[in-house]
Image: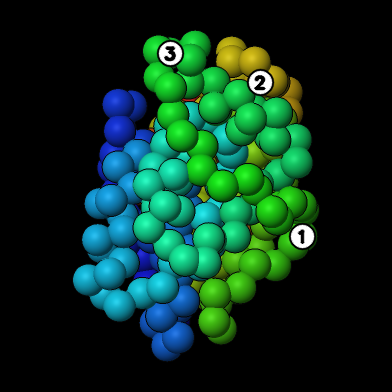
Amino acid sequence: MLEIVSFTLGPVQTNAYLVADAGTKESAVIDPAWDGHIILEAAQKRGWRIGHLWYTHAHFDHIGGAGAIADALNPLPLVALHSNDHVLWRAGGGGAFFGFDIDPGPEPTIDLHQGQILRLGSVEFEVRFTPGHTPGHCILYVPSSHVCFCGDVIFAGSVGRTDLPGGSWEQLENSIRTKVYTLPDETRLLSGHGPETTVGEEKKSNPFVSG
């Protein structure tokens, strides 16, 4: 069974998610936004072992806590990121553009791709490639829990910005229509910013991309 602990961290209030298989206590951090020590403490309190860092994309506010987490772990966690965002990762997630110098943590070792299955114990996460906000953006869908970690593709009543380097409105809209709105309506959308929503709600009322 999937367990989820959510955090809102850092200068732009980014959502980070600590996820674990309840049976094996294997755990991953999806978008370790900022203040890695806070995420670490939550895992230690529950007896969870963080073995993975999974990035929906490489913007600085989604990887800012990675260094602190990795520094406290032995062995180092496996880091997953789509190859199209490696350049952005090497540039510190674009943080310098906003006045932030971050430690991006360990080098990505797993290249995410469409249809890939990531596993935590018995829990399977399906990777869906959703470019538009960044060239390598991906979302992680867990069919068994009816939940999708959707990064900055779509928010409650809004969508990800496309005015940063590598952004594309056409790609973003296509990603939402083909990779998000094709999920079951009851699927919970856990976004990179703001409150959670559902696929059905966004198809019905999102003013940017209608269902």
Report the quarter where the N terminus lies: bottom left
- Residue 69 seen by the camera: yes
Left or right, residue 70 beside residue 167: left
Q: Amino acid at mark 3?
A: Phe
Q: Amino acid at mark 2?
A: Gly
As measured in the structure, the alpha-carbon distance from the residue carrying label 1 to the one carrying label 3 is 33 Å
Name which quarter of the figure residue 2 lies in.
Answer: bottom left
Q: Select label 2 or label 3 by which is in front.
A: 3
Q: Is residue 153 above or below residue 24?
A: above
Q: Tell me which residue sits at (70%, 35%) in the image.
A: 86
Q: Amino acid at mark 1?
A: Gly
Q: Locate residue 128, reporting x and y percent.
A: 69, 52
Q: Relative to the observer, which residue lies in front, 55 or 72?
A: 72
Mark 1 lies on a secondary structure that is loop
Mark 3 lies on a secondary structure that is helix
Q: Tell me which residue sits at (69%, 54%) in the image.
A: 109
Left or right, residue 146 beside residue 100: right
Q: Are marks 2 and 3 in contact (CB under 8 Å)?
A: no
Q: Relative to the observer, which residue lies in front, 138 or 205?
A: 138
Label 1 environment density (alpha carbons within 10 Å; few <14, some 14–19, many ≥20): few
Question: How many badges with numbers are in the image?
Answer: 3
**Residue that badge 1 annotates:** 115
Q: Select label 1 or label 3 by which is in front.
A: 3
As measured in the structure, the alpha-carbon distance from the residue carrying label 2 to the one carrying label 3 is 17 Å
Mark 2 lies on a secondary structure that is loop
Q: Earlier in the sequence, mark 1 or mark 3?
A: 3
Label 3 environment density (alpha carbons within 10 Å; few <14, some 14–19, many ≥20): few
Q: Which mark is residue 98?
A: 3
Q: Locate residue 167, reporting x and y percent.
A: 66, 21
Q: Is residue 98 above or below residue 35?
A: above
Left or right, residue 59 beside residue 16: right
**Residue that badge 2 annotates:** 167
